[in-house]
């Protein structure tokens, strides 16, 4: 891994990568890898309380992939 002190942060103009299942076992690893690679990450979570366990800098949106009407905010920008 690179030195976090010398790594640039994510480009605020770049669109975020949306991760469904971000609080799950695999999702947490994917979120971490994306952050390490310098991507902006937007986590799609069903349970907002679980979002607190995600790393700093992750944008969380409460939605459910089985309810398309909830996905709009997650897919904006």
Image (cartoon, grey):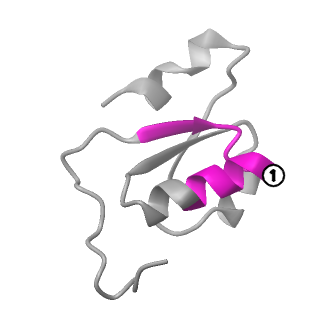
Q: Quadrant of the C terminus?
A: top left
* Residue position for label 1: 25
Q: Nearer the viewer, residue 2 or 20?
A: 2
Which image quarter: residue 57?
bottom left
Residue 74 lies within the magenta run? no
Whether residue 54 is situated above or below residue 16 in the rendered picture: below
* Residue in the image at 71% along x and 39% along y: 21
Work out which residue is located at the far front of the displayed protein and give it.
Answer: 1
Which residue range is magenta in the image?
A: 17-32
Left or right of 18 on screen, residue 52: right
- Percent x, y of residue 59: 47, 51
Element at label 1: helix
Whether residue 75 is situated above or below residue 69 in the rendered picture: below
Q: Nearer the viewer, residue 23 or 5?
A: 5
- Percent x, y of residue 5: 33, 88
* Residue in the image at 46% along x and 49% along y: 41
Whether residue 18 is situated above or below residue 33 in the rendered picture: above
């Amino acid at each position: 891994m690179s030195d976090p002190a010398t790594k640039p942060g994510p480009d605020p103009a770049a669109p975020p990568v949306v991760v469904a299942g971000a609080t799950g076992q695999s999702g947490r690893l994917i979120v971490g890898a994306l952050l390490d690679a310098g991507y902006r990450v937007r986590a799609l979570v069903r349970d907002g309380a679980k979002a607190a366990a995600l790393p700093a800098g992750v944008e969380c949106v409460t939605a459910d992939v089985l309810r398309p009407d909830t996905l709009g905010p997650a897919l904006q920008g």
